[in-house]
Amino acid sequence: MRVAIVTESFLPSVNGVTNSVLRILEHLEQSGDESLVITPATEGVPKIYAGAKIKTTFSLQTQNLKPLGLPMGLPQRRMKHLLEGFDPDVIHLASPMLMGGYVAKIARKLSIPTLSVFQTDMGGFARQNGFGIAQNSLQKMLYKIHSMTDRTLAPSPHSALDLHLAGVPNVFLWRRGVDSELFHPDKRNPYIRKQLLGLNSRRKLIGYVGRLAGEKRVQDLEILDKQDNLQLIIVGEGSQRSKLERLLPNAKFLGFKSGNELAEIYANLDLFVHPGPNETFCQTVQEALASGTPCIVPKTGGAKDLIKSNETGYVVDTSNPKALLETVSTHLDRIDQKLMRQNARESVAFRTWKTINSELREHYKELIEINLKSRNPINLKTGIVA
């Protein structure tokens, strides 16, 4: 197959959208498929990745959009020329916004099937970042873009239901993969825990991994930072780091971590907490589970679909300090914590990237086949292709 991937986020930026695209490109290369990436031009974008050529288009550097994490790519004719030159069998729109919506229109004119992946709740992020006035407009625009594509993949039942209720047709569930060899309970050991705890060796480790941005609601962990028996570990970078360092003076801010270093942090936590209420999926929760670490997540958003309450973690109102603290305390008093760690691991370990991306290739093939049949209809009487 020839697959064109249009993504509004790519290297050197590292986030959920980028990571998913990288795993897809690696899988396509291993499957013998050809791929092309079209992404906004930013400093440090590679020219090739996993055999795929990376083509860039004009991007707008607008400070006002950065707090929201909105894509910077702008529609332009070059995209049509790139697609015509590559002649893809299918176009994959990764978390589409401005660029993705434009390409969806081009694809219709060129009779190329499109698959879109819903990965960013822009309306929810707008509200959490103080742009409530833009929430409805952004959400309607997002739903309209997905309605223009032939198939939309949602990462969780929660997200799939939202799209369905908004009138988006042809929505399918497609979860994210996890590297269950990298993120593994075996990386839990006393030496790493001692490094994370420092002099406070009797404290329990509570961690958060992700961007330090308004929509992640990291400030809701303030109640945990005040407890003498807990050590809060914050992994990640973002515009709110300085503010959060002042708000959470006892927490250890480790900055951006990846690879084995990140895996060791996950495995040595006693609990993982992700308070972001607008996650469409939440990959960091899945990585923590694969590491054998029970998780606490909000009652809203896709992260709750990853948790089986009281077995692999807890679904609570993380914005309620009392409820959050009670949940943490209850967990630390449990005598079956080892069993919970085992359950957490088993709940996601089977979701390898190979399995997940094999499912994606089947979606590609189905769309290509449907497109070919629509372009070459068969006469039911004669069986002859028109």
Image (cartoon, rainbow, N blue to C red):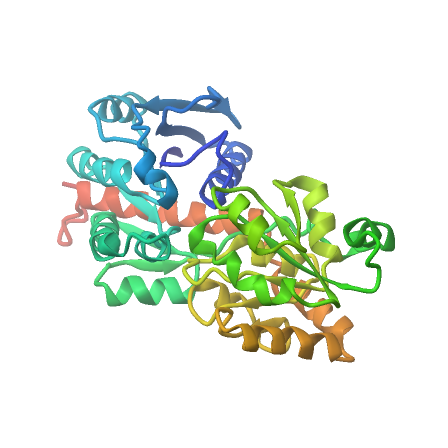
Residue located at (62% from left, 41% from top): 255
Image: 268 above or below 94? below
x and y, in percent, of residue 167 in the image: 21, 63
x and y, in percent, of residue 32 in the image: 50, 31
Observer-nearest of 227 and 51: 227
Q: Viewed as shown, does residue 307 lie left or right of 146?
A: right
Image: 332 above or below 101? below
Residue located at (21% from left, 50% from top): 141
Residue 345: quadrant of the picture = bottom right
x and y, in percent, of residue 209 in the image: 59, 51
Residue located at (29% from left, 28% from top): 60
Q: Viewed as shown, does residue 371 lie left or right of 52?
A: left
Q: Viewed as shown, does residue 219 lie left or right of 169?
A: right
Residue 8: quadrant of the picture = top left
Position of the C terminus by quadrant? top left
x and y, in percent, of residue 351 in the image: 58, 56
Residue 166 seen from this side: yes
Observer-nearest of 121 and 30: 121
Q: Residue furthest right?
A: 191
Observer-nearest of 236 and 247: 247
Image: 9 above or below 77? below
Image: 167 above or below 50? below
Position of the N terminus by quadrant? top left
